[in-house]
Image (spheres, rainbow, N blue to C red):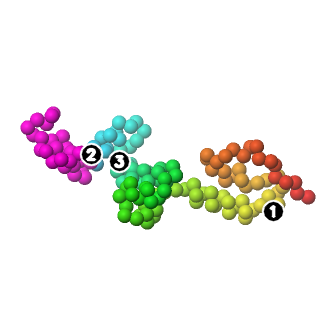
Amino acid sequence: MAAGDAWKETAFVFTTTVGTPLDAANVRRAFRSALKLLPSVDPNDWTQRELRHSFVSLMSAGGAAVEHIAHVVGHSDTSTTERVYRHELRPVLREGATFMNQFASVAEVAPDWHMDPLFRLPGDANRSGDPPPPEHD
């Protein structure tokens, strides 16, 4: 209504202020303008593509099946979703911590020392109530 006679009906949901289709430059400009409203964000440090990566990673971290994520973001199969867009560090870190805990056991290092606290990830269950490791002779 604000565009008045200048409005061009295109049936697009997202348009310029006169109804014409958005091009990539319009979207980038609007995105940077929105980011300028966030005090701790440098608009030049973010792209729309990064939002897609974040969205996929957050869905995955939240427990969504990779098939569902691929469907939501428009991938024809899960390979692109898994290889390109989904960034998960927790499983990789946990696997490394498990290996290190097996590699250097308490008996091999010292009876009063254990690697587990060194490799505990944020959000892991608090193990302060765990029984102490067994005593060694």
Furthest-left residue in this view? 5
- Along the line of sight, the residue nearer the viewer: 10 or 116: 10
Q: Is residue 15 magenta?
A: yes
- Along the line of sight, the residue nearer the viewer: 13 or 54: 13
Question: How far separated are the C-alphas under marks 2 and 1?
Answer: 59 Å
Mark 1 neighbour density, 10 Å: few (under 14) some (14–19) many (20 or more):
few
Residue 91 is at least partly visible in this image: yes
Amino acid type at mark 3: Asn
Residue under label 1 = 108
Image coords of residue 2 (percent x, y)? 15, 33
Residue under label 3 = 44
Q: Are marks 2 and 3 in contact (CB under 8 Å)?
A: no
Mark 3 neighbour density, 10 Å: few (under 14) some (14–19) many (20 or more):
few
Residue under label 2 = 29
- Along the line of sight, the residue nearer the viewer: 23 or 60: 60
Instruction: For mark 1, give the secondary structure.
Output: helix
Q: Which residues are magenta?
A: 1-27
Image coords of residue 79 (percent x, y)? 43, 66
